[in-house]
Image: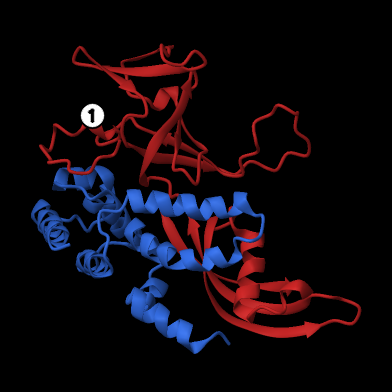
Amino acid sequence: MFCLSEMEDTVRVPPDLLNLPLEVAIKKVLQKLLLNKVLSIGLCVSIYDIKSAEGGFVLPGDGPATYKVRFIIVVFRPFVGEVIAARFKESDSNGLRLTLGFFEDIYVPAPLIPRPNRCEPDPYNRNQMRWVWIFEEQEYIIDDSCQINFRVENISYPPVPTEQAEDAKPFAPMVITGTIDDDGLGPVSWWEGCSERNNEDDDT
Amino acid sequence: MSGVGEEEENAAELKIGDEFLKAKCLMNCEVSLILEHKYEQLQLVSEDPMNQVSQVFEKSLQYVKRFSRYKNPDAVRQVREILSRHQLTEFELCVLGNLCPETAEEAVAMVPSLKTKGRAHSDEAIEKMLNDLSLVKRFE
């Protein structure tokens, strides 16, 4: 889920930004520094507010002005055990990959997909394997047709690689392992009949 | 240090500013209000070629808008007020506010801790809470 987090840091405002109102200049620097970065408290998605900025001294021979800034950011912070709404991104023989749009490193490995199931080549996508859950002789294909709820099982923070092969996948600083093997999890269409809800929300 | 006018505008428009700061965890609908308000500010800095960076903001906004049941600030505030009356942790409050379960059974499936930790919420109490929430939706 999303959280607010208060931080304090030293911010250097380069000379070309000093003609802007101070708050705007500091926000620009913080955005460049923090947006889309995985911090210890989560993935930073927005600078919420600047609470205070002190300093502004320019050290001799140094262009930027240095400020001690207290500010608040909005972060996406997954919790183990949290149920999160996501969409299907892709799947292969290892399992599913889900996405939130702004964050796409969510994996549901095969053992966490409800059984019985089968994995077969996707007739609509040559490069992909698709997963099908079998329940009471009905087949439920797992695809991008609706919202998928998953529960966070584990969050890992791989160390930054020192070198990467040219064709390696982009480095993911935070990886969520999720499960869809429980009540209420998986594609929401699996559960719609149960509570007889009038589903006005079109999630497709 | 910033323009006083902007602070006042923040407080008036959001109306829930102070409560946000006390709450560490936010529901998607609250984040939607926050990020929508920030959108104009992002336009100011969009001259910078940080497209990849500003993508995270836009996509986060897209996500919270799509997965929010409540849209207007009054409704959002009511939702937090209702959930706050039921001895929930910040985390439980936000998961319920995000996923909007319709029955006590669904609520417990999403937030099993409702029934554990020695403060077992009765099904009646949970149903009452969900019922109060569903009333907020109708008045939007």
Mark 1: secondary structure: helix
Q: Position of residue A144 (x, y in %)?
A: 37, 29
Q: Residue furthest front?
A: B47
Q: Position of residue A131 (x, y in %)?
A: 38, 18
Kind of residue at disc 1: Trp
Location of the C terminus of chain A by quadrant is top left
- Badge 1 density bin: few <14, some 14–19, many ≥20, Cα 10 Å: some
Query: Quarter-wise, where is residue A56 in the image?
Result: bottom right
User: Picture coordinates of residue A9 (x, y %)?
Assistant: 66, 72
Determine the image quadrant of residue A70: bottom right
Residue A160 pos. (x, y %): 70, 43
Residue A37 visible? The answer is no
Q: Residue at x 32, y 24 (%)?
A: A114
Relative side of B137 to A100, left or right: left
The chain painted red is: A
Of residues A11 and A109, which is closer to you in this image?
A: A11
Does the rendering let one see residue A34?
yes
**Residue B50 versus residue A120: which sits nearer the camera?**
B50
Tell me the quarter of the picture where residue A199 sits: top left
A183 sits left or right of A100 in the view = left
Residue at image location 71% in from the left, 79% down from the top:
A19
Chain for disc number 1: A
Image position of A173 with respect to A77: above or below: above
- The residue tagged 1 is A190
Chain B: colour as depicted: blue
* Apparent side of residue B75 relative to residue A24 in the rendered image (left or right): left
Along the line of sight, the residue nearer the viewer: A157 or A84 = A84
Left or right side of A198 for A167: right
